Structures are given as C-alpha cells and as structure tokens.
Amino acid sequence: MIPPSSTRSSKPEGAPAPVTSAAKRPPATAGAPRWYSRYLAAKEPIPRALSLPLGLASFGLVIGIWALLAYTRVAPALGFPNLHNPFFLPSPGTVAKTLYNMFAHEGFAHDVWASTRRIGLGFLISAAIGIPLGIAIGSFRVVQAFFEPIIAAVRYMPASAFIPLLIIWFGIYEKEKIAVIFIGVFFPLTLLIADVSANIPKELLNIAYTLGASRWQVFWRVLLPASWPGVLDNMRIGIGWAWTYLIVAELVAASTGIGHVILSASRFLQTDKIIAGIITIGILGLLTDALFRWAYWLLFPYSDRVSR
Amino acid sequence: MSAITATDVSMVFKTRGGRVHAIDRVTLEIPDAHFACIVGASGCGKSTLLNVMGGLVRPTSGSVQLDGRQIHGPGTDRGMVFQSYTLFPWLRVRENVEFGPKLKGMPKDERRRISRPLLEEMGLAEFARAYPKELSGGMKQRVAIARALANDPKVLLMDEPFGALDALTRAAAQRFLTEIWEQHRRTIAFVTHDIDEAIFLGDTVFVMTPRPGRLREVIPVDIPRPRTLDALGTQRFGELKRQILELIVEHENRALPQATNGA
C-alpha cells in the first residue's frame, strides 16, 4: 500500500488567506515581502472574499468615470465638450430613471422578451445542429473531410452581409432574425465543438477498447461524456455571438426588440434610451453567463475547475 | 496457462525523412504467470511493441499470439495500464473499476462483487465514490490497475505505469505491484526505461536497443522472491544492473558516431 502521506495534491484556491490581518501586520523581519506583494505575483491565487469586491469595483470604476464626465467639467477641460452635454451623454441617474420608465410605462419588458426569445430560438437551432455535427466532425475523419472545408469557408462570410438576402427570403419578421443568428453562430460553433471532440486524448479511447468496448461503445461511453464539458464551454461563447447578431438584425429591420428600441431612440437623439438598452443587453449577457457557469457546476462536478 | 508471444514483429513508420524501423523483427515469449520487463532507451520501440501486443496497433509484419492463438485487435483478455492518467474523469472510482464488467452487461451486484475486493486490495475502499480529480497520482494508477484486473485478463500489459510518479510514491507503487502480482499471478509485460524498476519487478528483463528497435538480450533475474527493499542492495542486483546498462550504453556508443555521420 502506498503511504497516505502521498495522497491528494494541494489545492491552493481553497486556502483561506487572512487578508485583513496580513494587511495590518507590521513587517516581521527586515526584507519581508510587503502585504500586497503576493497579489502582484503572476497566477497566484487570491482569497475568494476579495474577488467579488474587485469585480464590483470594476463596475464602480466605469460608472465613476461616467459620473465624472456627466456631473463635472472634466470633459470640456480635456477637449471633449460633447461628453458634458446631457443630450449626448446623459448622467447615470438619468439613464437609471429612463430604464425604470421604459420598463414601467413603455412596455420595454415586451422588447426584452422578444429579443430573448429570438436568441433562444436562434441559438437552440444552431446548437441542436452544430453540436452533433461538430462532434461527428471531430470524431470521424470521413465527416470531417466532407463538412469542414465548407463550414470553414462560410464562417468567414459575415452574417450581417446575409441580412439583405435573408430579408428577401424570409421576410422582415422572426424567421429572418433567427436566420441571422443561425448563420452567425452555427458555423463557428460547429468548428469549436469539432475541436473539442478532436482533442479528446486518444489514450482514453484506447483504454476503453482494451476494456472490451466496441467502436459504438467507445463513441457513446467515452467520446461523448469526455466532450460535454468542452461543449458547454463553447456554447457559452456561442451565445455571446448570438447577442451580437441579434442586435445587428434588429437594427436593420424590426418592430420589437432591444435593437429596435435602440434604433428608434437614436432617431430622436434619446441617448439615455440608447444607453439604457445597451446596459440591458449587458445585464442579460451577465445573466446568461451565470446560467452557463451554474450549469457547468451542476453537470460536471468531476471537473478540475469545479471545487466543492 | 496464458503465455503471450510476439513472433517476428516489425513496425515500420513512413516519415518525411524516410522509413523508420520502430521495431525490427522482434520475437519474444512471456510464459504463463511470468513477470517480464522490457527496458530500453527512448525510441527503442518498447511502447510500440506493447501496443502491438495489446492489439491497439497493427504491426507491419509479424504477429502476436495469446496461448497460441493469434490476436486481432484489442480484447478483454489483455488489460492495459498506461503512463498517463487514463481514468475516465466523469466516473467515480468504483465506476471506473466497473467499466469493463459494465460493458459486458453485468448486473450491479455482480459488478460490486468484482470491484469491492479489488478496491480493498488497492487500499481504495474509502475512495470508491471519489472522482479521479480527488486522487493523487499513485492512487490514480492503482485504480487503473484495478480497472484492468476487473476484466480478469489473462495478461496485463503495462506501459511505464509509474513513470509520472515521484520517486517515493513510485517505490511504494512498485512494492505494491509485486504484492498484487504474487497474489494474482497474472502474466505481465511491463515496459519501463528504469533499469532498477525492471530488475526489482521482473522475472526476466528484455533489453531493447533503438534505431532500429531490436531485442538485444534476454536476462533472467535470479533474485529470489518475495523481493523486499533489501534486494536493491544485493551484489547480484548490482551485477544485473551493470550488465543491462552496459548493453544499452555499448549500443549508444556504437550508434552515436554513425548517427552524426549519417544524419
């Protein structure tokens, strides 16, 4: 038996680092590292209690700069007078009020829902075809040889360039929006997923063969489960693209949706509404991201990245 | 009775620089319940030979027989353990061990009857529900050995299974493997580049030399079992080590000037 002393590799991220006490402690010996030096060492873990405040502080920084431009005369002094004009750059307070009004009185929730629904459908269709196809491309050379060149070519054609055609083909309503998202997401997502399954170590498959697995079993019981975490990772990246293409589609032709609200606001120089719309997209993006992280944590407790 | 034999196995790879003889007409026989170690410098084809015996790689020419029957492809009669950690990360330790039996469609109770004693033997009973990420390198390799044994293979093929372990864990793992072998008495082919490891573990050491990969010498290890740490310090151990080292070094010296001229 191997002695228990050699068990378990250390997990630095779990180590409770006493921030405050370390900060207050005077240097013990001459030449001892200053309290902040450990945060300046590359790739060193930081205490969890610190990462949330740091994340919030970055939002604070952006809003702070914004407030500085809106409420003080810094911008004109620096030579950007437009940034101190409430018509061009409304203050954070105004935007917050506008955002509230949009939800309370202008039916903005309906637009948010319209956009979310388009994202959901467009992304679901892309993923429903892209994931199986990507896995097949990454796993079977025949499939790869057939599909990869065409997908790689289409990937370089910008989805927004298809919009005129898509309007002609699908009209200006939901189908067209979903088609734009599909073209923007499906092709790159498929190639990323193909990469995931292509990079599953051959040895993992070989060991399954030596344990008596058939080719079919190797695919279903090893290749697929080994691919899922990477698939989810790339879905998270893909849904970000979906947002980009949705707004592009809604800016071109739409009667509902966040993009539509932004476009009509720009016609009347309602910059507060534009910013409110952009912020809403950001919040929805954060929420989707959190949803994917949570799903990862829930589905892949065995992953190295999940500590519980 | 389970002997594994390689007959006239050659493996030629075509590269841009020409044809490379990874293995050149290697014939060897590992008798039943025999612990055979295959040593050699890197590039001598020892791992390729093991993969050929495992059926993962088809040799350019020659064949492999298990109990006189030619093998075609991998099978449950030959369990393998690799150097890299090949546990399935999404399966718990017990599920990893039961992977082979489950493929056969064995019901749960029967699978437990196989995995429980194996996990106990490996000192891993309390880790049955742990995921591989929670294990140390040495523990992972013990699970990999248990997983191979769960299929009740006739032959165990091991490719530097302790190569990634630190020196202390490695020594413990070697002692552990001898104990396992003394109980199970499986035929084992064990590839390593560590001469000490080969002598400590093996009944026979097959010495291979590279470019082209050939079987240079077959050296019986006449150190009595059970072998303990004391065996490492004996005069006989030193003699064997020197003998093997000389075979490898002699070949290097001969090959080096040629290699520099030729390439």
Image (cartoon, rainbow, N blue to C red):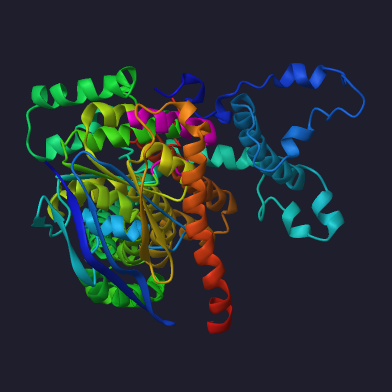
Q: Can you tell which quarter of the image residue A88 is in?
A: bottom right
Residue B168 belongs to the span the image colors magenta: yes
Residue situated in front as seen by the camera: B140 or A247? B140
Please indicate, yes or no, whether residue A302 appears anywhere in the rendered image.
no
Where in the figure is residue A2, as x and y percent of width and height? 43, 24
Q: In this view, does A257 lie above or below A140?
A: above
Q: Is residue B176 above or below residue A126?
A: above
Q: Which residue is drawn at 14% across and 56% down?
A: B65
Q: Is residue B200 above or below residue B195?
A: above
Where in the figure is residue A186, as x and y percent of width and height? 31, 63
Q: In this view, does A197 lie to the left or right of B76?
A: right
Quadrant in which the C terminus of chain B appears: bottom right
Q: Can you tell which quarter of the image residue A308 is in?
A: top left
Quadrant in which the N terminus of chain B appears: top left
Q: Can you tell which quarter of the image residue B162 is in?
A: top left
Q: Which residue is drawn at 32% across and 24% down?
A: B122
Query: What span is colored magenta in the figure?
Result: B161-178
Where in the figure is residue B163, as x and y percent of width and height? 45, 44
Q: Residue at x 75, y 48 (%)?
A: A69
Residue A57 belongs to the span the image colors magenta: no
Q: Residue at x 75, y 52 (%)?
A: A84
Please indicate, yes or no, whether residue B159 appears anywhere in the rendered image.
yes
